[in-house]
Structures are given as C-alpha cells and as structure tokens.
Amino acid sequence: MFAAVLDTCVLWPSLQRDFLLSMAVEGLYRPLWSEAILDELEFHEAAKLERRGHSAAAAQATGARLVGTMREHFDDALVTGWEPLEGTFSLPDPDDEHVVAAAVVGGAGVIVTLNRKDFPEAQIPGHIQVVSPAEFAADTVSVLPTAAARAVEMLATRLARPPMTVDEVLDQLVARYGMDDAVALVRDRG
C-alpha cells in the first residue's frame, strides 16, 4: 500500500487531520510518522487548547489522548530506526531531518507538509515527493472517490462539537484548507 509521512503541521489542524486519517481508514494509503512527529503534535495540541482557555492539565491530557488514539488506530504507522539518518539530508531546518529520515526508513513515497520550503527537492531522495495536504488529498481522492466519500461520511458522523453534515465538512475543507480539487472529486463521484 502507498505510504505517506504526515508532518506535524498537517496533523495539527483537527478537521484536516481527521479527513486525511479517515481516508487512511478507508485503505486509500498508509500513514506514517515518527515519535518526534507525535511528540510535536501532542505539544502543539495541548498549547492550542491552553490558548483556548483549557487548564494546562486538561490540555495535556487531551493532547496525550489524541496521540494515544492515533497510535491505537494506526498501530503500524510509527516508523522506528530512523535516527541514524537524522542529519544526513542537509535540510535548511535541521529540526525537519527526522521527517525525511522517517520517510526513507518507512518506505514512503511522499511527505505531506505545509513547509515545502524546508524540504528542497535537491535534498530529498528522488523516490520521495514533497506535497501540500491539498495536493495529497486531491491525489488520494482521485484513486477512489467513492472510498473518499465514505471517509467524509464517517467523519461527519463522528463530529459532535460542532456537529457537521457531509456538505459542511466538504465546505470547511475548501474554506480552511484549500482542498478544492479533492472536494470537487468527492462531490462529482457519481
């Protein structure tokens, strides 16, 4: 199955993360991440919740629960053994080396990130593409739009705060994340 490393910046926005992971549940691709990505996600999720008024303890517990749920539902997503490659890619931001190392060790064909400038093509092994979440979503949906539609339907049924219909989810994917192409493919599937 096609594998993709999801960078922290892609996993942090809740609806975007839930959409991308719902497509993985439908078998459209295999998500990958490193322990460093999960640590960053847990930290940023807790910080976001604290800024929104949650207590530090509640925010940290929610961040930990999110990462725990991801570990449970995607028990084959964690890439280990990438550490020896860290620092070998000469990236502009050394803190991003673990992302490329995880992609190489995990056999990913793509790194999904919003920080493309930090992953210059000349520094990335040739078999790995670096794409935005919107590009990845469009490419993934195009493989099997009916499965992507099921992913959105599943996502909409889980949303409670606030509840959203399928159309509202699709509208938000366009408005918040620029996923126009992916949403058009889902809406035009049949």
Image (tube, rainbow, N blue to C red):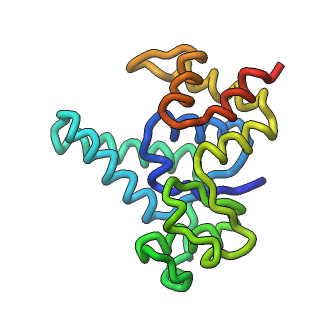
Specify whether residue 76 is in view.
Answer: no
In terms of image quadrants, where is residue 113?
bottom right
Q: Report x, y in % for residue 46.
A: 28, 46
Q: Report x, y in % for residue 45.
A: 33, 45
Q: Residue at x 37, y 42 (%)?
A: 65
Q: Is residue 111 above or below residue 172?
A: below
Q: Report x, y in % for residue 173.
A: 55, 30
**Number of numbered tags placed on the structure image:** 0
Q: Residue at x 57, y 74 (%)?
A: 101
Q: Is residue 94 above or below residue 135?
A: below
Q: Is residue 62 left or right of residue 186?
A: left
In terms of image quadrants, where is residue 167?
top right
Q: Report x, y in % for residue 83.
A: 50, 79
In the displayed orientation, state which residue is furthest to the right: 190
Q: Is residue 152 above or below residue 134?
A: above
Q: Is residue 13 left or right of residue 186?
A: left
